[in-house]
Amino acid sequence: MTNHPARVVRTVLSLVVAAGVAAGCQPTEQEKTPAAASSATGAPSPTVDVAANSKQVCDAALAVSKEHFVGMADDAIAAIDKPVSAKEAGEKVRAHYTAMAQGLRKEAARAADPQVRTAVENLAGAIEKRLTGPNATKVEAPDLDPTLKALDTACGH
């Protein structure tokens, strides 16, 4: 990791943009219809308040993303005072992205609204794809912008 203040500023700006895009995850009014009371197997399932569930999932997805983007920014800022090798910095970034994808997958499974579930799954998938490419150890992630915007839209903004 380079030890330039400009990189830290870009890192923090990247965090702010990503968190800002997802910050408004609020369900829309049309999502307030309850889910069907029975499943295909005939076993009763509880009625789900889709709007409340969507808000919970969106808030949790934002919290997971924010936790790891902040962690990456904190790591970059800490590297100013105590430089780390490029390998160690890359491993930290990779660990944050891996944990973020896992957390998003967990939240996606809880989503009652198919649009919210798909948006969260797509973001997790985009992160997992990123982890297989040449940018796996880079904090800056413009490749995630479309999926972050799709999540923002699914969450009502």
Image (cartoon, helix red, strand yellow):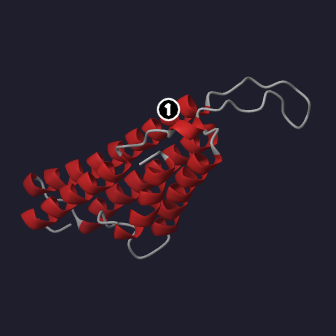
Mark yes or no: residue 119 visible. Answer: yes
In the figure, is residue 42 to the left or right of 129? right
Residue ID at (42%, 59%) = 149
Residue type, label 1: Gln
Mark yes or no: residue 144 visible. Answer: no
Residue 46, compared with residue 69, is above or below; it is: above
Residue ID at (43%, 65%) = 146
Relative depth, front residue between 149 and 14: 149
Disc 1 secondary structure class: helix
Q: Residue furthest right?
A: 42
Residue 86 position in % (x across, y down):
25, 67
Residue ID at (38%, 48%) = 22
Residue 64 position in % (x across, y down):
41, 42
Q: Residue furthest bottom?
A: 134
Residue 134 quadrant: bottom left
Residue ID at (46%, 74%) = 133
Relative depth, front residue between 101 and 153: 153
Residue 111 quadrant: top right
Residue 25, compared with residue 133, is above or below; it is: above
Neighbours of disc 1 within 10 Å: few (<14), some (14-19), many (20+) = some
Relative depth, front residue between 3 and 50: 50
Question: Which residue is labeled 1 in the image?
Answer: 56
Quadrant placement of the N terminus: bottom left
Residue 44 position in % (x across, y down):
84, 24
